[in-house]
Image (spheres, rainbow, N blue to C red):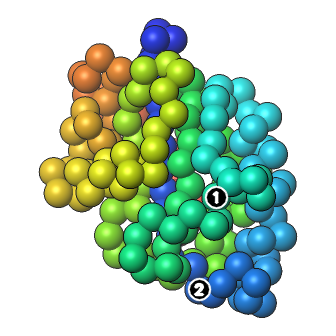
Amino acid sequence: MSDGTFHLAQVNIGRARGEMTDPVMAGFVGRLAEINALADASPGFVWRLQTEDGDATAVRPYPDPTVLINLSVWTDLAALRAYVYRSAHAAVMRNRREWFERFERVFVALWWVPAGHRPTVAEAVARLAHLEQHGPTRQAFTFGEPFEADGRPVPRADVPRSDACPAT
């Protein structure tokens, strides 16, 4: 939980099965504006990475050009969790395997930022790498092993276990 002096940043990446113009990606591209608008209107939403096209599909943070990135900021973990697991976003992400290959490495990281800070793509990539190298810490953590804004681990009893990853 944040007292308002910190917000929660999240990054997720995925390896697309094709270019955004390829037929295999049509279902994803067709829902992208809707899902971005849903995020923008969700309680607790603060900011998301986007180009002049209104999304971040043109941003390529890795040498592999098929890896796409999503980067956003939320008021707190509860708001992000509600969007990810209990909105129309979850239903769309259940179809993730149609558009994205299974990613065997860490593909989601969360971390606290001072309110008003907009994380860079380089910062997000570094947080993913930190999580992969060190596991969940106050520097980068997961939904399943979150940390408070003050750096304390969230007690396991307070972490919802009923939310299933919508991308599986």
Q: Is residue 24 above or below residue 149?
A: below
* Residue drawn at (25%, 23%) of the image: 151
For mark 1, give the secondary structure: loop
Image mark count: 2
Kind of residue at disc 1 = Ala
Q: On the image, numbered disc 2 is attached to which residue?
A: 17
Q: Where is residue 110 in the image (x, y as percent from the top left)?
A: 40, 41
Give the side of residue 110 with respect to residue 152, left or right. right
Q: Residue at x 73, y 89 (%)?
A: 22
Front in this rendered view, residue 36 or 92: 36
Q: Position of residue 10 (x, y in %)?
A: 48, 43
Check disc 1 and report the residue beneath it: 56
Q: Would residue 98 be seen by someone viewing this image from the given angle?
A: no
Residue 122 shown left or right of residue 49 in the figure: left
Question: Is residue 6 visible in this depiction of the protein?
Answer: yes
Q: Give x and y (percent) for residue 55.
A: 71, 56
The N terminus: image quadrant: top left
Disc 1 to disc 2, C-alpha distance: 16 Å
Q: Which of marks 1 and 2 is in front?
A: 1
Q: Residue at x 66, y 50 (%)?
A: 50
Element type at mark 2 = loop
Quick check: marks 1 and 2 in contact, CB under 8 Å?
Answer: no
Please tell me whether residue 82 is drawn above or below residue 63 in the rendered image. above
Q: Is residue 72 left or right of residue 140?
A: right
Earlier-in-chain disc, 1 versus 2: 2
At x 32%, y 42%, the residue is 141
Density class for disc 2 (Cα within 10 Å; few <14, some 14-19, many ≥20) is some
Q: Residues within 10 Å of mark 1 (few under 14, many from 20)?
A: some
User: From the viewer's perspective, is 65 left or right of 46?
Assistant: left
Q: Is residue 59 above or below residue 24?
A: above
Q: Hey, what amino acid is under mark 2?
A: Arg
